[in-house]
Amino acid sequence: MIPVPSGVRVWIATGHTDMRRGMNGLALQVQQALKRDPHAGDLFVFRGRRGNLVMVLWHDSLGMSLYAKRLERGKFIWP
């Protein structure tokens, strides 16, 4: 579980994202596509093409973190 402080915004990237990207690639996508600062403390959530992989990019006061979660069965349903 990610200990997220209250007041943190969660940004969900619509569509699918190339999951081969690492921390720097996703941070660049946040800057270019969402026009947001990836180091502002918000959570940025990305979903893979098949829907079974989600990546979360987050910068806390200590540094940038990249979390990945893969479902063995089923899919992450996107709003």
Image (spheres, rainbow, N blue to C red):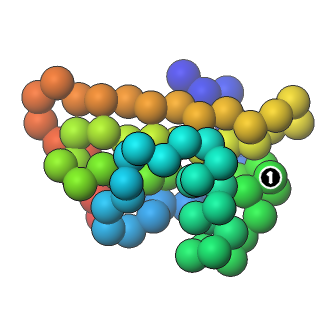
Determine which quarter of the picture holds residue 16. Answer: bottom left
Q: Is the N terminus in the top left, top right, bottom left or bottom right quadrant?
A: top right
10 Å neighbourhood of mark 1: few (<14), some, or many (≥20)?
some
As displayed, is residue 76 above or below residue 3? below
Q: Which residue is mark 1?
A: 39
Residue ID at (80%, 52%): 39
Amino acid beneath label 1: His
Residue ID at (38%, 68%): 14
Determine which quarter of the picture holds residue 49. Answer: bottom left
Q: Position of residue 58 (x, y in %)?
A: 67, 43
As displayed, is residue 33 above or below residue 4? below
Residue ID at (30%, 29%): 70
Q: Residue furthest left?
A: 73
Count of all numbered marks drawn on residues in the image: 1
**Badge 1 element:** loop
Q: Position of residue 33 (x, y in %)?
A: 57, 76
Looking at the image, residue 70 sits to the left or right of residue 34; the answer is left
Q: In front here: 33 or 21?
A: 21
Q: Position of residue 46 (x, y in %)?
A: 43, 53
Q: In front here: 47 or 10?
A: 47
Determine which quarter of the picture holds residue 66. Answer: top right
Q: Is the C terminus in the top left, top right, bottom left or bottom right quadrant?
A: bottom left
* Residue 43 in sight in this render: no
* Residue 54 in sight in this render: yes
